[in-house]
Image (spheres, rainbow, N blue to C red):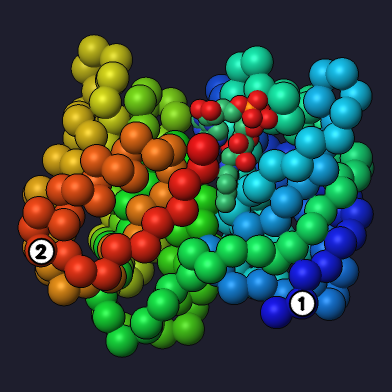
Amino acid sequence: MAVHRFEATIRELKELSPSVKHFRLSSPSAFTFKPGQFVVLSVPNPSGKLVKRSYSIASPPKADEFELCVKGVPGGEASPYLFSRKEGDTLQCQGPLGAFVVKDEANALVLVGTGTGVAPYRAMVQDLLERGFKKNILLLCGYRHEEEVLYDKEFSHLAKLHDNFHYHPVVSRPAPGYRGAVGRVQQLIEAYAKEVNADFYLCGLTEMIDDVKKLLEEKGAKRIFFERYD
Ligand SMILES: Cc1cc2nc3c(=O)[nH]c(=O)nc-3n(C[C@H](O)[C@H](O)[C@H](O)COP(=O)(O)OP(=O)(O)OC[C@H]3O[C@@H](n4cnc5c(N)ncnc54)[C@H](O)[C@@H]3O)c2cc1C
């Protein structure tokens, strides 16, 4: 798939949580990608020097646009700039890049993500279900606080529509009275990921990936793919 360099216009910006924004961006018609791939944005840091940062595409392939979900990392070089953008502003993009894509559609999938690590799964899950994927897809997402849970309504809705799609979010530091599941994604794996022969996908920060990979290997999982955000 050819890598393109292009200027994308921000068509829509939405606050998904206090620290995460969703971007809908224009793309040239030649820009195609596989769900799970990412783009690289060139962004001025606070000193004005251009830095490059990667962002997973959070939408399935569409004719002339794509979506991103960006966490504002306090003190970060690039993400505060992205956070300060407005609808109509432009961003310098390069992509698609990466190989974190569904490897074998003959297998059941277990998708594990923390924070914005859910972004590539939004692309994969929508694409697979739209195309009539029949194997089980288990999506396990971990967050610190309940207000940080991303795309919850969308995933819950898809899980109601499709018998083969199962969605479980978990929160590690809930406010008193929180009614959802409390803990870490590791506990969700123990509770729900019973098919050890599934293909496991892990996305997020290294600490989670290393922990979960170790846990899965101890359980005998053989096909583990991951995308590290740091
Ligand atoms: C392949 C790939 C895909 C990525 N996709 C996304 C994405 O879809 N959405 C997204 O928000 N980020 C994503 N990232 C992370 C992103 O590229 C930047 O690292 C992030 O925006 C911080 O950049 P910064 O310049 O603001 O921070 P920097 O000054 O570079 O500081 C980096 C520190 O920020 C922390 N950090 C990085 N990413 C995150 C995060 N997502 N959540 C919490 N802490 C983080 C890490 O601890 C890291 O040490 C991706 C990274 C890679 C390699």
**Compared to 149, does 75 lie above or below?**
above
Q: Nearer the viewer, residue 97 or 123?
A: 97
SS state under label 1: loop
For label 1, the residue is 2
* Residue 134 position by quadrant: bottom left
Residue 157 seen in the figure: no
SS state under label 2: loop
Q: Which residue is drawn at 70% across and 42% down?
A: 53
Q: Residue 59 carries which label?
A: none
Q: In which quarter of the image is the N terminus?
A: bottom right
Judge from the rendering whether residue 206 lies leftward or rightward of residue 22; answer left or right: left
| Place of residue 189 in the rendered image (x, y in percent of width and height, measured from the top left) | 17, 50
| Circle 1: residue type | Ala
For label 2, the residue is 220
| Circle 2: residue type | Gly
| Place of residue 186 in the rendered image (x, y in percent of width and height, measured from the top left) | 19, 42
| Place of residue 27 in the rendered image (x, y in percent of width and height, measured from the top left) | 83, 63
Proximity of marks 2 and 1: CB atoms separated by less than 8 Å = no
Q: What is the count of numbered marks?
A: 2
Question: Splitting the image into four quadrants, where does ligand 1 fall?
Answer: top right
Q: Residue at x 22, y 17 (%)?
A: 177
3D distance between C-alphas at marks 2 and 1: 37 Å
* Residue 12 position by quadrant: top right
**Compared to 107, does 185 lie above or below?**
above
Q: Nearer the viewer, residue 228 or 115?
A: 228
Q: Which residue is drawn at 77% across and 77% down?
A: 2
**Compared to 33, does 224 lie above or below?**
above
Q: Which residue is drawn at 19% across and 48% down?
A: 214
